[in-house]
Amino acid sequence: MVKTRVVLMPQYMGKFQCIGSKCEDNCCYGWKVNIDNKTYKKYRKSNESSLKFLLNLNIKRNRSNASPENYAKIKMKQNGDCPFLEEDKLCKIHKELGPEFLSKVCRIYPKFTNIVNEVYEESATLSCPEMARLVLLNRDIMEFDELEESADIDNNIMRQININDIRYSNKVKKYFWELRIFIITLLQNRKYSITNRLIILGLFLKKLQECVNSEKIKIVPSIIQEYNNIIESGDLEKYLDSIPVNLSIQMELMKEFNDHRFSTGFSQNARPYINCVTEFLSGIEYTDKAKIEDIVKLYGEAYLNIYEPFMKDHEYILENLLVNYVFNQLFPIESKWGVFDDYMRLVIYYSLIKMLLIGMSAYNEKLDERLIIRLVYSFSRAVEHNNVFFNNTFELFKQNGYNTMAYMAILIKN
Ligand code: SF4
């Protein structure tokens, strides 16, 4: 009998298919591509003469810290491209030997898996533009399916937790499911603007953090109930409207982020992201010599004239971005940081994308789905796939004292 396992996944996962040569980019450059030992052995045995030479030349054993997963690696070309990628943007190994000869990494990308208790949760990185389209461009509320699949299917496991572990009996992790349901429901509550949903989430997580600090974990369900009542009543609307907008501080934070990102250098897979940042900077005429008030004026105009009118009808794109993040990062409890720190990371992620889009829309004199997908997949390649960089930026924000709800609201609100 075939052994099976339970899998939870957003519905978009079932629709994904690599579009190969029709892809506006490809995923075959700039990465370190590991070859697992099973695939390596298949290559050694292959008699396909036209490929044999290329395989021998470009697949190299990992001599230090090798494991069954990273037994060997592909030696990329000097420009970062994969040597097996052909002019039609198709993979020579896939074409001549078939998909079963692809390494595990290439076969699984852009999907990855978290295991929560015994359940395999499948989702995807947005660094693939086709996947980014499926995740973001769906007008309906993102829904999830629980299915059964063969236990033999390969996966790339990123995180694994068991929330029933006795060690978590007095930790916020114990309420993982209650928190996840509350947060996703709030982020999908279209009675509120996306800005207000994010600010309410911050107020809630600030309160949750206080409860963690004072070790009153048992009251988590009552805080959830209290916030459900507040959200339902609409009592917060007046307060949310009174939060001031401060575009100068947004620009300063953006500058710090960019200076830091550029000072750490870029790998080849950040090429499309560099184009996006260049468009952002040109769009709002951001130079060393420009006055901050002039930059802020152009940024504010781009927001009012281009970004806001488009987003009024397309807020579901930002909603999907956030819900996907919450689901696949096991937000907010699966990190070594506190729940409010995790919220800061989410806000930095969201607001950087928003700010870049505003500047890019000024440069392109329009905002549309193509531009959003181009930014989101490029950002994911350059930033999300670089944990060290994201952690450093986050620490920098904290050192500068930006880790307060007031600063988070400034980042979120335009
Ligand atoms: S980026 Fe996505 S759609 Fe494009 S080639 Fe890679 S897997 Fe296929």
Image: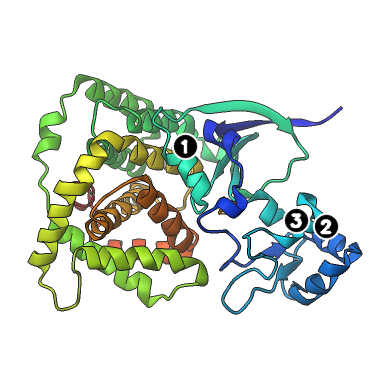
Which amino acid, by three-letter code, is at mark 2? Answer: Lys
Labels 2 and 1: the sequence-earlier one: 2
Labels 3 and 1: the sequence-earlier one: 3
Which amino acid, by three-letter code, is at mark 3? Answer: Lys
Mark 3 secondary-structure assignment: helix
The CB of the residue at mark 2 lies under 8 Å from ligand 1: no
Residue, disc 2 = 38
Q: Residue at x 33, y 38 (%)?
A: 208
Q: Position of residue 146 (x, y in %)?
A: 60, 26
Q: Position of residue 143 (x, y in %)?
A: 48, 27
Dot 3 and dot 1 residues touching (CB under 8 Å): no
Q: Position of residue 253 (x, y in %)?
A: 23, 63
Vertical position of residue 379 compared to residue 304: above or below: below
Residue, disc 3 = 95
The CB of the residue at mark 3 lies under 8 Å from ligand 1: no
Q: Residues within 10 Å of mark 3 (few under 14, many from 20)?
A: few
Relative side of 331 to 156, left or right: left
> Is residue 388 in view from this perspective?
yes
Quarter of the N terminus within the rendering: top right
Residue 170, numbered label: 1
Vertical position of residue 340 compared to residue 276: above or below: above
Which amino acid, by three-letter code, is at mark 1? Answer: Asn
Dot 3 and dot 2 residues touching (CB under 8 Å): no
Q: Residue at x 41, y 54 (%)?
A: 374
Q: Position of residue 233 (x, y in %)?
A: 20, 20
Dot 2 and dot 1 residues touching (CB under 8 Å): no
Q: Residue at x 61, y 52 (%)?
A: 20
